Amino acid sequence: MKRFTFLLCIAFLSITFGQEKIKVTSVYGSENKEVQALLDFENIYIQTLTFHGATIKGKHYEVTISEYENGNLVRTETLFDGSESDYFRNQSNTLPLTFFFKMADGKFKGFLRGERFGSKKVYFDLKSESDMYVLKDFFGSSNEWFFTSDTNKATAIFAIITPKINPDGSGSYCEVAQSDVAPERFGTHFLIPHYFLVSIRFKEK
C-alpha cells in the first residue's frame, strides 16, 4: 500500500512539473492621452502581454485567431508560428508580445509584433456594427494572470466579443470575459452570435 501511494505521489509530481504555471502581465494602450483618445475613436486596441516562466524558455510559440458563429468554430487563422525557424525560439524566461487589433468598416484586422519581428496581418468580416465589438482579456481586476502550460493545447488570451444582452435590454461585456465559462463556449452559454478568440500555444517545434 505504501509503495502504491509513493508511486501515485511521483506521478502527481511529474504532472505538476510538466504543466507549470505561466504568469502573464499586461500594459494597455498608450500613455499619451491624445494618442489613446485617437485609438479609442478609431476602434484600435493595442496591448502588450509579457509571459513569464521557466517553462517557456527554449520553446516555440504559435498565435492563432479563431472565429465563432452561433456557437460553432467556423475559421482559424495563424497569426504567427515561430516553429518555422529556430530564429524565433524563445531564449529567456520572459516573452513580451504586442497585439494590435482594429474593428472598422465591417472588418476585423489583427497584427502581432515581437522584439525581432512583425507578423502578417489577418482579416475577418464582422457580422455586427464595428463599434459593438470590444477587446477583452482575462485579467479581471488583477494586474497579473496565470495559466497552465500545455504543449498540446492553445490557451485563449483575448476575446473580441459583442455584448451579452440582458433581459432589461442592457449589454454586458465584463460578465462574459470574467466568467468561469470556457471561452470556446461563450457563444452557446451567453447567446453571443459572433466573436473571436486569440490564443497562444507554447511548443517544442
Image (spheres, grey):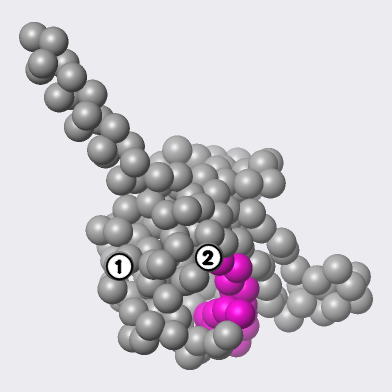
**Residue at the image point whose x is 58% and y is 85% from the top:** 116
Where does the C terminus fall, quadrant-wise?
bottom left
**Residue at the image point whose x is 22% and y is 29% from the top:** 10
**Residue at the image point whose x is 71% and y is 61% from the top:** 27
Q: Amino acid at mark 2?
A: Ser
- How far is mark 1 from mark 2, CA to CA? 14 Å
Residue 153's image quarter?
bottom left
The residue labelled by disc 2 is 92
Residue 188 in percent (x, y) is at: 34, 50
> Going by the image, does 56 lie left or right of 117?
left
Numbered range of the magenta stretch: 95-115
1 vs 2, front mark: 2
Describe the element under mark 2 as helix, strand or loop: loop
> Going by the image, does 22 lie left or right of 85?
right
Residue 199 visible in the shown view: no
Residue 73 in percent (x, y) is at: 29, 66
Residue 155 in percent (x, y) is at: 40, 57
Residue 63's image quarter?
bottom left
Dot 2 crowding, Cα within 10 Å, few <14, some 14–19, many 20+: some
Vertical comparison of 108 with 132: above or below: below
Residue 204 visible in the shown view: yes
Q: Earlier in the sequence, mark 1 or mark 2?
A: 2
The residue labelled by disc 1 is 204
> Going by the image, does 197 lie left or right of 132?
left
Q: Is residue 109 magenta?
A: yes
Describe the element under mark 1 as helix, strand or loop: loop
